[in-house]
Amino acid sequence: MSLELGNITFDCHDAAALAGFYGELLGRSVDPEASEFFATIGTAAGAAPVLMFLKVGEKTPGKNVVHLDFHAPDWRAQADRAVALGAKHVGDFDEYGQQWATLADPEGNLFDIGKSH
């Protein structure tokens, strides 16, 4: 038996709002029944992995060590679109033959949008 990735989970303050941000960013629908306490993207569509958002009292302090990396041919335009949706631009990077922008979602979780290969 092998493992498979089922969910990518976000601890957050408002599950429905943060799911709405990622739904807009990815062009995917937030699953029905989303609330401030729990929301998902991908369950109703049968997509994997499912993005899952859970309201928590307090987030773990410090930088998140696991983050999402998105790739697109028009990565700079996608990073600008993410900012227009409510993300904060943290910085641009060009290292190890890779180019990407690091951003923070509306609740401060870091993610990257980089150039497709």
Image: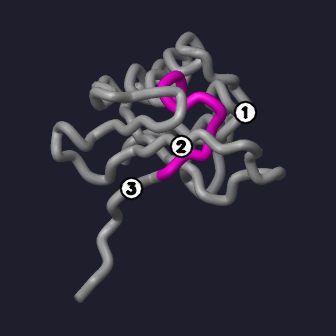
The residue range painted magenta reads: 9-18
- Front-most of residues 62 and 33: 33
In the rendered image of this protein, does residue 27 appear above or below residue 13?
Answer: above
Earlier in the chain: of badge 2 and badge 1, it is: 2
Q: Circle 3 sits on which residue?
A: 7
Q: Residue at x 59, y 39 (%)?
A: 55
**Residue 105 percent coordinates (x, y):** 62, 30
User: Would you name the residue on which mark 2 appears?
Assistant: 54
Q: Residues within 10 Å of mark 1 (few under 14, many from 20)?
A: few
Q: In this rendering, does residue 37 appear at all? A: yes
Name the kind of residue labelled 2 in the image. Leu
Helix, strand or loop under label 1: strand
Looking at the rendered structure, the kind of residue marked 3 is Asn
- The mark nearer the N terminus, 3 or 2, is 3
Residue 28 visible from this viewpoint: no
Report x, y in % for residue 33: 33, 28
Q: Which residue is mark 1?
A: 91
The span from disc 1 to disc 3 (Cα, nearest Å) is 27 Å
Asked if residue 14 lies left or right of residue 32, the reply is right
Farthest residue, direction right:
61
